[in-house]
Amino acid sequence: MRSILKSFSLIINYKTIIVTTLSIISTYVCYRLNLVAAFPDMLVGVAIVFPVVFSIGSAYNRRETALQRLADFKGHAIAIYYATRDWTADKGSDLPKRMRELMKELFHVMRDMLAERKTDRWQENEVKIYQMFSKLSSYTMELRGLGVQSGEISRISQYVSKMIIAFDNMKIVHNYRTPVTLRAYSKGFIYIFPIIYGPYFAKSFDSYSSQLVYVMPILYSFILVSLDNIQDHLENPYDNVGEDDIDIDAEATARLLD
């Protein structure tokens, strides 16, 4: 029950209360002034629900792509560490320890970077990550002096390349989201629609008992604003705000490298 209430608290917020209040006021004023109209119901689906559902689906697909790329990144990182630990003839080298520390730092910086907006600090973390990739590449070259054959070193270099590609894919998901114009269009209609539909809700007063006359404006407001809040939570899958966000658990990955 607590988790359900928490989920509702994320999609029903102050915006829901504001829009609902304004729609009730609009309906009451229109009823008192006898401003009634039979607006078509299909306008809601065509103008609002369809674009919002399309945006939610697009955001969810980006989240799934980011999850796949995170799995690629994590899998290749662990494989590289195991290679430096198990493939070398010299077991006294400190390369596995240095590689483990580098991987831990890489995951921590990537988690902090993707959770932020694109600011100066974001760009600093991006540069830091590529510097760590460079160090990772130089570590793989040390394997040559530890008895690892060139073919195996080439395979590890491919793992490094795949980590960089996976990181770039996750970065693209962070930077390129739902088209700004589509989001602006959806938000505008979502917040205005329950208010301008006051004449439509006022016309339905004769169809309901006095205790239920405001059910329609309340339901429309709750449904539309909740859909918009769901879209907002899915927009950035790394910000750890929504319950469906991606958790880049750097500590859990670090434990796998011990």
Image (cartoon, helix red, strand yellow):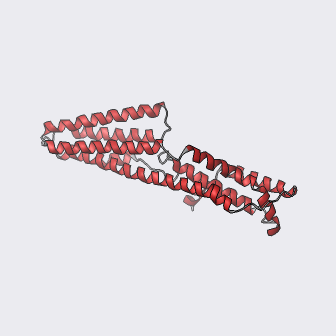
Quadrant where the image shows the N terminus: bottom right
Residue 77: give x, y in percent of width and height: 30, 45
Residue 257 visible, this angle: no
Number of numbered discs overlaid on the protein picture: 0
Viewed as shown, does residue 11 lie left or right of 87?
Answer: right
Instruction: Residue at 29%, 47% (x, y): give it.
Output: 76
Q: Nearer the viewer, residue 76 or 36?
A: 36
Instruction: Residue at 43%, 43% (x, y): give it.
Output: 172
Q: Nearer the viewer, residue 145 or 190?
A: 190
Q: Quadrant of residue 159?
A: top left
Instruction: Residue at 81%, 62% (x, y): give it.
Output: 203
Residue 218: give x, y in percent of width and height: 72, 59
Q: Nearer the viewer, residue 225 or 13?
A: 225
Viewed as shown, does residue 147 lie left or right of 16?
Answer: left
Residue 202: give x, y in percent of width and height: 80, 60
Residue 23 visible, this angle: yes
Instruction: Residue at 70%, 53% (x, y): give it.
Output: 193
Residue 136: give x, y in percent of width and height: 27, 37
